[in-house]
């Protein structure tokens, strides 16, 4: 089963679709969770997910705003979609009936 | 970010692999983060990458199992070869208490060949098994060089490092090619083993030097993975 950060990364990449690359995924995660996402955590997790066959990456085009440097593009594979769905369903199931009231 | 700050970030990013450096520097430029945070980000990624590498057995084996003990043993062999040479060709010079094989030209030749073969194969193993943690293996290799060189005081310092050149030669070969030709690997392993047995028979081999046979037979075992250029698929 996925870890929570792996789930966040796959979900962000799936949301961004064809525009999913390192900086964009990082910004998406930071704006959604309101927590800082380090580049180290991002790229090591992308590598781990790629090894598991859950995402596919390749070097994309360079843009002027990046100082002429290439992007590392990310695409979620069907296996990745399945794993994310499984994680989401598990979280949804376990959350049913829970009341978040501090005793 | 200032030009100086960006220059520092680019310098630190040199620790990353070329593709990763390209993507990370692009991300940092796009996010327009300050220099200090960018440097911490790059260093964080580098240390995470290193931590992943050290979860594997290879860096431990090459660092603590090959580089560290081999450099100590090969330094002793270098000293032994030098003192044997001096005693043979400069008999007026006395070097009591220094390691040496039994005197004799043929045994000296044998030791010189073994020194080159041991150094080359140890370098090859370090190069082929721990490319990305090479820095750690090199530091471990330097530890005995600095801490034990005073043991062989009368000998010139350079004489203790005869193993360095063949070691670097083997290291470069290991970095470029993961293996050697089968015939070469087996022939080298067999020759080294026979020569070690001969020197052992003449009491001219330190028992610990048998440890140096492991990289030699690793080379022979790795040679079985060798795929000739003509059989490689593109």
Image (spheres, rainbow, N blue to C red):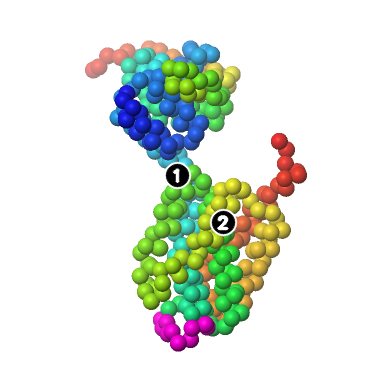
Instruction: Name the residue carrying label 2.
Output: B170
Chain of residue at mark 2: B
Q: Identify which residue is drawn at 56% across, 56% down.
A: B170
Residue drawn at x 52%, y 60% as measured from the top left: B165
The magenta stretch is: B87-97
- Which label sits on residue B112? none
Magenta stretch holds residue B89: yes
Q: How many marks?
A: 2
Badge 2 or badge 1: first in the primary sequence = 1
Position of B229 with respect to A88 (left or right) is: right
Asked if residue B212 is among those painted magenta in the image, a careful observer would answer no
Magenta stretch, main secondary structure, is loop
Q: Is residue B85 above or below residue A100?
A: below
Q: Secondary structure at mark 2?
A: helix
Quarter holding residue B156: bottom left
Across and down, in percent, residue B125 comes to 55, 54
- For image coordinates 30% across by 14% down, the residue present is A100
Where residue B54 is drawn, which disc sits there?
1
Q: Dot 1, how many residues are within 10 Å of its Cα: few (below 14), some (14-19), or many (20+)?
A: few
Asked if marks 2 and 1 touch (Cβ < 8 Å), the reply is no
């Amino acid at each position: 089963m996925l870890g929570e950060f792996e789930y966040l990364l796959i979900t962000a990449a799936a949301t961004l679709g064809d525009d999913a690359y390192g900086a964009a995924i990082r910004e998406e995660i930071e704006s959604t969770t309101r927590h800082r996402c380090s580049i180290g955590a991002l790229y090591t997790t992308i590598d781990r997910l790629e090894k598991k066959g859950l995402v596919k990456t390749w070097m994309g085009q360079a843009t002027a705003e990046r100082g002429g440097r290439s992007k590392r593009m990310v695409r979620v594979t069907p296996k990745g979609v399945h794993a994310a769905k499984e994680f989401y369903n598990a979280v949804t199931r376990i959350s049913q009936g829970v009341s978040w009231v501090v005793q | 970010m200032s030009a100086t700050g960006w220059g520092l970030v680019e310098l630190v990013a040199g620790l990353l692999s070329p593709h990763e450096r390209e993507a990370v520097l692009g991300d940092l430029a796009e996010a327009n983060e300050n220099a200090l945070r960018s440097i911490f980000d790059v260093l964080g990624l580098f240390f995470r990458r290193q931590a992943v590498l050290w979860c594997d057995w290879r860096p431990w084996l090459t660092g603590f199992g090959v580089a560290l003990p081999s450099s100590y043993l090969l330094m002793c062999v270098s000293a032994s070869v030098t003192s044997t040479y001096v005693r043979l060709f400069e008999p007026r010079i006395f070097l009591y208490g220094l390691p040496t094989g039994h005197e004799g030209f043929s045994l000296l030749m044998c030791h010189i060949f073994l020194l080159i073969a041991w150094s080359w194969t140890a370098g090859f193993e370090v190069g082929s098994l721990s490319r990305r943690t090479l820095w750690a293996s090199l530091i471990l290799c330097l530890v005995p060089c600095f801490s034990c060189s005073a043991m062989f005081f009368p000998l010139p310092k350079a004489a203790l490092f005869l193993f360095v050149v063949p070691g670097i030669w083997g290291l470069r070969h290991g970095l470029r090619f993961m293996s050697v030709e089968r015939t070469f690997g087996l022939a080298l392993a067999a020759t080294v083993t026979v020569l070690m047995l001969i020197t052992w028979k003449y009491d001219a081999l330190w028992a610990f030097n048998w440890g140096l046979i492991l990289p030699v037979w690793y080379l022979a075992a790795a040679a079985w993975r060798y795929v000739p250029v003509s059989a490689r698929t593109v």
